[in-house]
């Protein structure tokens, strides 16, 4: 027999459920803990007067590095540059710190160091690395350093530092519009009146004027400083080293990551591929070749015949590939894939002769025999460190890892020796 339910019966049956749902909604509460960073402002005058040698300080969030003579210049992300006397690689001395708020990238020509300071380019005389002096500030040339969400920057001042504050909020379960974000961002807030930062967009290749790692975004070639942002390649004329002059820019695409110079060419790594630019006409880079790959982070180095590209996965890379791609340059116009080598989570890389050094994340530093690009094989793996970038030159490898700056002697590749380590603040 077919059962028939009246509207009154249905209402009576559903009423307890509706009331229960309402009670749950009224009483459901959740707590969330967030890390927030509140800006500390200084005037332009205060900041510029303070761009000089300060006492050496512990390294906490190191970034890009650059070698000039027996000095190492190591970026402290968004804070400045550590100056390390490396005349004795077994006993490096952290001699001073140059305070440059918003600094991420650096390069050197002669006695002048170029660095970004948020949206500005600064030139610093390092003739005496222990007594540097600010020479020039070129304002507003890096407009890609901007902030998202509702954060309102006081444009009349400079953010000298960020003060961390952990906060816990309690809210109804159905309130999904609260403070949100990732601990990897500088700070989190969706409150229009908040004075906290949500996120920032910021971002060296061998050079005759010094050496930087493969994660670099600044590079000096002859009389020009080349820089890359998220989309553009920008050129500065530095014939007068102290007075850089903006020469122009070339739009490359999206998600540009690294810049590596070799002879009269720039190799640009992006999340979707590698680009090759001819800079024989220094102020007018011309695209000569490119090679596409899956979405992934993409440091690149090159020599006369081949380019070596590491692809890695991770949140910021939006990919799942972890490998080394070896490309034959074919006269720079039509790069072709030679071979793919599987890796764990590769970051920076460097090459010295037939030795290829790859920072493979948690899997340590790996040293390969790359005499035959189609048959690269592992010679040595240094474990116990999570590696980020490496510069290998003249039988010494300087490695930036998550816990310190390591230096190795690889004159005997069968017996690579640790020369020194400068610990980072934990």
Image: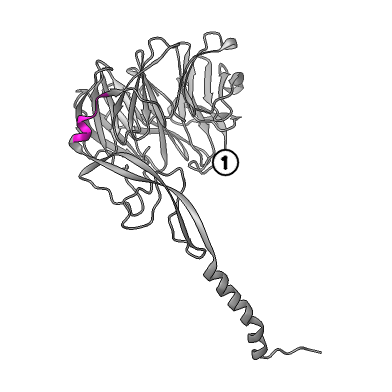
Q: How many marks?
A: 1
Tell me if 420 is positioned left or right of 108 in this view. right
Q: Position of residue 282 (x, y in %)?
A: 28, 27
Residue at the spot x=64%, y=81% of the render?
14
184 part of magenta stretch? no
Closest to the observer: 188 or 361?
A: 188
Q: Is residue 204 visible?
A: no
49 part of magenta stretch? yes
Q: Position of residue 375 (x, y in %)?
A: 61, 21
Residue at the spot x=56%, y=16% of the render?
371
Q: Quadrant of the N terminus?
A: bottom right
Q: Secondary structure at mark 1?
A: loop
Q: Position of residue 292 (x, y in %)?
A: 49, 38
Report the colour scheme.
one colour
Residue at the spot x=38%, y=46% of the render?
199
Vertical arrangement, residue 81 with respect to residue 180, above or below: above
Residue at the spot x=38%, y=13% of the render?
86
Q: Which residue is mark 1?
A: 320
Tell me if 345 is positioned left or right of 98 in this view. right
Q: Is residue 311 visible?
A: yes
Closest to the observer: 4 or 367?
A: 4
For disc 1, the neighbor class at 10 Å (few under 14, some 14 to 19, many from 20) is some
> Where is residue 332, by image quadrant?
top left
> Where is residue 324, by image quadrant?
top right
Range shown magenta: 46-53
């Amino acid at each position: 027999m077919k059962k028939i339910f009246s509207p009154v019966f249905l209402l009576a049956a559903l009423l307890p459920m509706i009331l229960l749902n309402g009670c749950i909604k009224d009483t459901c509460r959740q707590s969330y803990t967030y890390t927030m960073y509140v800006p500390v402002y200084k005037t332009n005058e205060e900041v510029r007067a303070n761009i000089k040698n300060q006492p050496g300080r512990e390294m906490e969030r190191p970034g890009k590095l650059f070698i000039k003579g027996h000095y190492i210049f190591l970026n402290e992300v968004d804070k400045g540059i550590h100056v390390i006397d490396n005349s004795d690689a077994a006993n490096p001395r952290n001699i001073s710190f140059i305070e440059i708020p918003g600094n991420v990238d650096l390069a050197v020509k002669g006695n002048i160091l170029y660095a970004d300071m948020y949206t500005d380019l600064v030139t610093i005389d390092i003739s005496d690395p222990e007594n540097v002096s600010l020479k020039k500030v070129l304002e507003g040339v890096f407009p890609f350093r901007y902030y998202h969400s509702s954060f309102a920057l006081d444009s009349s001042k400079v953010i000298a530092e960020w003060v961390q504050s952990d906060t816990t909020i309690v809210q109804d379960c159905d309130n999904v519009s609260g403070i949100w974000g990732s601990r990897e961002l500088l700070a989190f807030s969706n409150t229009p009146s908040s004075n906290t930062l949500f996120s920032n967009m910021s971002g060296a290749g061998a050079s005759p004027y010094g050496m930087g790692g493969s994660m670099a975004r600044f590079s000096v070639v002859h009389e020009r400083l080349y820089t890359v942002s998220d989309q553009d390649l920008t050129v500065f004329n530095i014939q007068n080293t102290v007075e850089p002059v903006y020469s122009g820019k070339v739009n490359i695409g999206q998600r540009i990551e690294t810049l590596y110079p070799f002879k009269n060419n720039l190799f640009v790594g992006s999340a979707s591929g590698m680009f090759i630019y001819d800079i024989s006409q220094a102020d007018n880079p011309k695209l000569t070749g490119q090679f596409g790959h899956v979405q992934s982070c993409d440091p690149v180095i090159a020599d006369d015949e081949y380019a070596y590209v590491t692809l890695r996965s991770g949140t910021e890379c939006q990919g799942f590939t972890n490998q080394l791609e070896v490309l034959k340059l074919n006269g720079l116009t039509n790069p072709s894939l030679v071979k793919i080598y599987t890796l764990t989570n590769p970051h920076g890389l460097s090459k010295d002769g037939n030795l290829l050094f790859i920072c493979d994340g948690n899997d340590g530093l790996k040293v390969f025999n790359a005499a035959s690009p189609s048959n690269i094989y592992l010679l040595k793996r240094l474990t116990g460190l999570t590696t980020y970038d490496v510069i290998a030159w003249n039988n010494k490898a300087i490695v930036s890892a998550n816990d310190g700056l390591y230096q190795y002697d690889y004159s005997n590749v069968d017996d690579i020796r640790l020369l020194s380590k400068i610990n980072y603040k934990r």
